Image (spheres, helix red, strand yellow):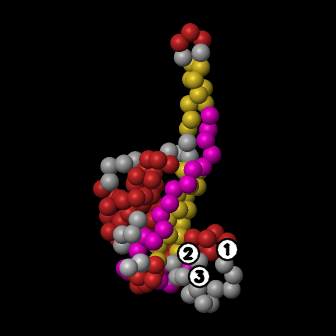
Amino acid sequence: MSTTERHRTSARRESILGDEPGAFATARFVRITPMKARRVVDLVRGLPADEALTLLQFAPQSASETVSKVLASAVANAATTEGLATGDLVVSVARVDEGPTMKRWRPRAQGRATRINKRTSHITIAVQPAETVVAKTKKGAKK
């Protein structure tokens, strides 16, 4: 189904993709710190989807497995719900937002305690056809 045939769009889709073709996937409440996840997400932003999946497969960071799953889900969503060809998809939006933090306490010396923050992340990845991303960058480029 293309965007012109779409009867209603969610507010999340509007905020991520607007009215352009593409699909997205989100992993919420992932138990990895946002700073560590952003390092991995910055590697794949702007790359073709198949190259990004290959890069994530061999990346040594622990967050690369989760980001790889989210990217694979976004590509599958583009193929099934939007009917886009998976060969020409590009990672257009890749962001990591901070989720809720679990606060834990650790005993320390002399009867004291310190707080341990166990942070969570919301990882969002959107893929779009390559010609849409190229047209968007040409339109937004300044001379």
Image spot of residue 125 (x, y percent)? 49, 65
* Mark 1 residue crowding within 10 angstroms, few (<14) / some (14–19) / many (20+): few
Q: Which residue is mark 3?
A: 19
Q: Which residues are magenta?
A: 79-103
Element under disc 3: loop
Q: Is residue 20 left or right of residue 59?
A: right
Closer to the camera in the image, 79 or 116: 116
The amino acid beneath tag 1 is Ser
Q: Tell me how far mark 2 sits from mark 3, CA to CA.
A: 6 Å
Position in image of residue 68 (x %, y %):
42, 60
Q: CA distance from mark 3 to mark 1?
A: 11 Å
Residue 92 sits inside the magenta stretch: yes
* Mark 3 neighbour density, 10 Å: few (under 14) some (14–19) many (20 or more): few
The residue under the point 60% across, 90% down is 4
* Up/down of 59 relative to 32, above or below: below
Q: Residue at x 45, y 53 (%)?
A: 38
* Residue at the disc numbered 1: 10
Disc 2 to disc 3: CB gap under 8 Å: yes
Q: Is residue 111 above or below residue 128?
A: above
Name the amino acid type tagged 3. Asp
Left or right: where 125 falls relative to 115: left
Residue 98 is at least partly visible in this image: yes
- CA separation, marks 2 and 1? 11 Å
Picture coordinates of residue 136 (x, y %)?
46, 80
Q: Are marks 3 and 1 in contact (CB under 8 Å)?
A: no
Could you classify mark 2 by the number of other residues whose Cα lies within 10 Å: few (under 14), some (14-19), or many (20 or more)? some
